[in-house]
Image (cartoon, rainbow, N blue to C red):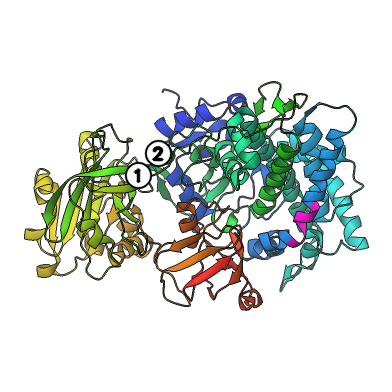
Amino acid sequence: MPITPGEAITLAELEQDPYPVYARLRAEQPVAWVPVAHATFITRWDDVVRVARDAETFSAAVHDSPLTEAIGPNLLHSDGEYHATRRAPLTAALRPSSLLLNAEPVVQALVTGLIDELRSGSRRHADLIHDFAVPLCVRTLCAVTGLPARLPEAQVWGWIGAITTGAANYERDPAKKAAALAAGAEITAVVREVLASGPPPGSLLEGLAAAGTESGPMTLAEIVSTVQLLVIGGMQEPRDLFGIALNACLADPGLKEEARVGQGAVTRVVEEALRWGSPVGTLTRRVLRPVEVAGVRLPEGAVVAAVLASANRDEEHWESPDTFDPHRQHSHHLAFGGGVHACVGAPLARTVVTTAITEILDAFPSMRRTVEPPYHGWEFRGPTSLTVDWSGPRTSGRASVPRRPHEPLSLTVSHVREEAPGVRSLWLARPDGAELPAWKPGAHIDVHPPVDGGESLARSYSLCGSVGDLSGWRIAVRYDENGRGGSRRMHGLTAGDTVQVRGPRNHFPIPDRPGYLFIAGGIGITPLLPMMEAVTKAGRPWRLLNLVRSTAQAPFREELARYGDRVQWWDTAERGRPDLAGLPVDGHEAVLCCGPEGLMSEVEHLAEDGPASWRSCEVFVERFRPRPQAADGPDRPFDLRLERTGEVVRVPSGRSALSALEEAGVLVPSTCREGTCGSCEVRVLAGDIDHRDSLLTPQERAGGNLMLLCVSRAHGEELVVDL
């Protein structure tokens, strides 16, 4: 029997460079049993996101994981109330607003002191991992947690080595486990002493000591296991992230100068370093009920490793994923996980690294690498050294800043065609006839039609032409007389008109499955057209249920006619809504749906709570608006006024403030994007906030000066934020 790609993996090749291994798995075996890791690796973006967010199917409570064996029962590998109550004091202390008051001044002072040490005497060279990043992380950890500042740095760094080795002990080496347990015993002694004398006010240890449930406060063992997690996250992650990000700057003189003088540039570098480098490699989960992922059936009790580092390099989700590009239009990576288990220390890691790189580049403008740094690891990965010198003359003037590769395209409407009453196809092409960027089925573009004064419009449209034709992009627009004017302006375009276009981007790719059920409602047929063409060429079975108001006046009838009886037309004017619950479905099929919100919500509901045949399916939908949620007010548009720059960003109905800022090129670090972790928290200087998060306390909401950009909105016309 031939050996599978997963079975062929060795720990040695993962430690040396895991990315070629992950690329092979994504292409050949996206769900792969990997014996050396005692887990099933899941490597594609969509599947990793699913594992990270679906807590009903994939539990974080993996009590026999290498991490749990190394440090005992812990916050990271727990669920429910246990997880929530033990995470709460950390979230409260590590939110951006709390860091601004407490940790940021400490980090700034530590960075300044270490830079002064580098400048001392006639020194002109250093290994910035060992001489700067390590002491910075150790001192920050002690200051924030409340561990004694007198602890020798070598001892603390010995803990990180022992614990991380134990946490990645997939081969179950007794010596590695013993070293981790010995480090845990030393930490227990130190924590017991701190708790006995009283933790420093405002420290994480003070918060942990005060936390608890109705059954009582946290035990010493629980506090110690949490401290050990903080040792891993507070030292390894920022150390490796610092090395990855600074190395990228030093490897590219243009990027280095941009980071040194450009507003917000270091933040972009850090976010791209998180995506490109993924300092933490995997999330471990246990399957709670039988489930199918990428065509592979996983039994109850199976242990899976959702490979964050692989998802962050998935070529189906990222353009040129192996290229370090801080100017990507979207930077929503999975480096810190997602959902309720998103890394609680993400804001602190970002603060430490952003501060350190900003100050180093300012203090040493002539700094350069002396050698290419070596990288090592797969569960925890980063450069093991970064040797530099700054003996050259101080630079003067400003280096050329690289042009952003995602600037809007100026395209011409080449021709227009009526597809049905109220529906028009438009073909967009370069004025010089050159080829447009390649795209894949499911991709969409953002079109900015010309506007004579008034609101600047941006509307998203699925590409619905042939994937192989790069001479032009086809979109289809349905006229909406009750809309805000976007479809009216698009229908007013004629051949020769010019529009600005961003993209393409793809959040609705075709999953690799044995078969497909497509469900379309009205204009929702557009992203499915190139999908059906692609799966037909691939020889995969498929069928389409196409819901239209009138079959006789439906768009794209002639195109769909060539597929014969694989297309089922459903005339809602004559037959009403179909009984989707009674629709025959195959658990091996992927269900892809696009259409009105009611249709997509019904399909999602069936996959969650419908008949058994539906619950065995994987469902994918394409929304250009977030799923409806309970809110204090209507989901209406508003303006975000950025106090520091004076810029005004329009937040349309159906789009989050966070995504609107990202579209405008304003990067705000985020992690969970669900209103639970606090990473995107900002200060609000004026305006009435419509809070929709799950984090802020009633008192904080009443204070009216904080909001989470990923979910919250405005009750009025404008919010002024500290950006």
Q: Callout 1: 10 Å neighbours few (<14), some, many (20+)?
A: some
Question: With respect to residue 497, does 120 lie above or below?
Answer: above
Q: Quadrant of residue 11 in the image?
A: top right
Q: Quadrant of residue 125 in the image?
A: top right
- 393 falls in the magenta region: no
Q: Judge by depth and name the residue closer to the eye, 627 or 445.
A: 445
Residue 57 place in picture, x, y as percent: 48, 55
Question: With respect to residue 412, does 659 lie above or below?
Answer: below
The structure residue drawn at horizontal position 51% and vertical position 25%, both measured from the top left corner, is 8
Q: Which residue is mark 1?
A: 509
Instruction: Say which element carries label 2.
Output: loop
Residue kind at label 2, given as amino acid type: Glu
Residues at circles 1 and 2 in contact by the CB criterion of under 8 Å:
yes
Question: With respect to residue 720, does 567 lie above or below?
Answer: above
Q: Which mark is residue 316?
A: 2
Instruction: Say which element carries label 1.
Output: loop
The structure residue drawn at horizontal position 20% and vertical position 48%, both measured from the top left corner, is 426
Residue range corresponding to the magenta coloring = 101-106
Instruction: Decide which of tag 1 and tag 2 comes sooner along the chain.
Output: 2
